[in-house]
Image: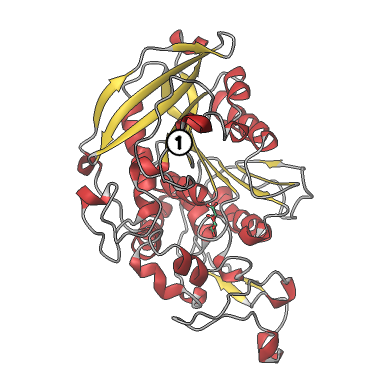
Amino acid sequence: MKHSVITKTFCIALLPICTLPNFPAHGQDAKFVPNYDEARVPEYELPDPLSGVETKNDWGSRRAELYERMATQMFGTMPSPEAAKLRIESTSPGKLILDGKCVLRQLKIKIAGQSVDVALFLPVSASEKPVPIFLGYNFNGNHTVFDDSSITLPQSWMRKTADHKAHEKDRGSSSGRWAIEKIVDANFGLATLYYGDVDPDFDDGFRNGVHSQLGVPSDSEAASIGTWAWALSRVVDALETIDEVDTQRVAVIGHSRLGKTSLWAGASDERFALVISNNSGCGGAALSRRQVGETVWKINDSFPHWFCGNFKQYGRNEGAMPFDSHTLLALIAPRPVYVASAHEDRWADPKGEFLSCVHADPVYKFLGTSGLPSKKMPAPNTPLHGTIGYHIREGKHDVTDYDWQQYIQFATKHLVQ
Ligand code: GTR
C-alpha cells in the first residue's frame, strides 16, 4: 500500500532566496529566525509507515523496522532493563491528604545508581481495588507538585533555581500544572518524579545522572530524552510491586521536552496503555519537515544532550529523515494517544502537531481503531477524542486544568469504560 503525502503550498524553486527562512550555516552564530509563515513551509513528502504492509501480520515487522530507525537515528537505543539494577529502597506509609480522599505515598528507588523519588497520589478506593494511574515527570521536583511538608526535597541538580538546589519555599509552586484533586475524584492515581533525578538537564558530556553508571552513549545510544523515557519504564517495574496501582492501565504523560519523552516511552514500552504529549513540539509530535518554529537544527544546537549523536545529521536536512513525528505516533498504535497544542505556542508548531495525528491516522485505522475523528484542524477548545485525541486550547505553552479535563475524559473512555 503506497500513499505519498505531499503538502504543496507553493513551489519552493520559484521563490526568491531572500524570502526563505533565515537559517544560519552549521557552526555559525547568526541569529536563528523561526518561520511562522505557512506560505514558506517547504514542500515535503512524508515516509509512509504502511509501506509494504498488506496484512496486520506485516505490521509487526514493519513496526520493528520503524522503531529501530527512530531509536538509532533520533532518540538512541535504550539500555536494557537490567542495566538499571533497579532497587526499591523505601516505601513510605500512606498519608491522607485532600480532606481524606487521597493517599500520598512516596517510593525511593535506585535506577542505575541514581536515587529517584516517586510521589504517588492515590484515591482512597485504591486500597480495595487497584486504580489506573497517570505517570509523568515533573520539571521542578515532587515538592512543587503539591504543597505538603512530607514530600521529599530532591537532592539532585535543579534547573530553575539560582543555586541549583531545591528549596522549602517552592513547595506547591507547580501545583497549577497538576490537577491532583480532579485526577483522584475521577478515581485515577498520579505517580510523578523529578526528571533531573534520572539525568540532570544540561550538557555535561554525559558524566552525571544515569550515564555516570551506563557510560557515555555512542552516536546511536540513548542520550537524555532516551534515558528519561527508559527510566519511566523502570518506574513501572517498581510500581508493579504496589498493590494499589493497576500497571495494566498506566497513562504516560509529559509536557514539552517531557512530552517528547512520554511519546518515546510509549513507543518503546507497550505496557503504557495510553500516551499523552502536551505541547511537545519539535522532536515530539510536530512534523519536523515543516520547519515551523523550532527546527531540528535549532533543537540540536540548543540541547545537544537531548537526542542521540546521529540525529545531528538531520539539522537542515529534515527530508533525509527516514521517519517523521507521525511515525512516532504510529509506533504507539493501536494504543490510544493524545496530542495537545496551545494556540499561542507557535514555537511548538500546533499545526504540525495536528498533522502528525492526521498522518498517523491511516495506521490507527489499519489496525482497526477509530483513529482521529476529523482531518480538519479543530478550532481552539473543541477537542477530538477518537483513539487519537487532539485539542488546541487557548493560551500559551503550559499544562492547565483544561488539558487535564481532556486527559481524564480520554483516559476514562479508553481505560475505564
Ligand atoms: C524549549 C525547547 C522546546 C521545549 C521546551 C520545554 O526551550 O525549545 O523544545 O521542549 O523548551 O521543554 O519547555
Q: Is residue 109 left or right of residue 244?
A: left
Q: Say which quarter of the image contains residue 108.
A: top left
- Estimate the x, y position of residue 171 in percent, counting from the top left: 52, 29
- Check the image and report above or below for 126 versus 324: above
Residue at 58%, 63% (x, y): give it. Answer: 287
Q: Position of residue 119 (x, y in %)?
A: 43, 26
Observer-nearest of 286 and 362: 286
Q: Which residue position holds label 1? A: 141
Q: Residue at x 40, y 64 (%)?
A: 304
Instruction: Give the number of marks.
Output: 1
Residue 152: percent from left, percent from top: 39, 26
Q: On the image, which quarter does residue 385 sit in?
A: top right
- For the point 42% across and 46% down, the residue is 163
Q: Nearer the viewer, residue 379 or 385?
A: 379
Q: Residue furthest front?
A: 163
Q: Residues within 10 Å of mark 1 (few under 14, many from 20)?
A: many
Residue type pointed to by label 1: Gly
Quadrant (top left, top right, bottom left, bottom right) of the C terminus: top right
- From this viewpoint, is residue 282 visible? yes
Is 403 on the left or on the right of 232, as rendered?
Answer: right
Q: Is residue 254 placed above or below 14 in the rendered structure?
A: above
Report the residue that reaches farthest toward the right. 379
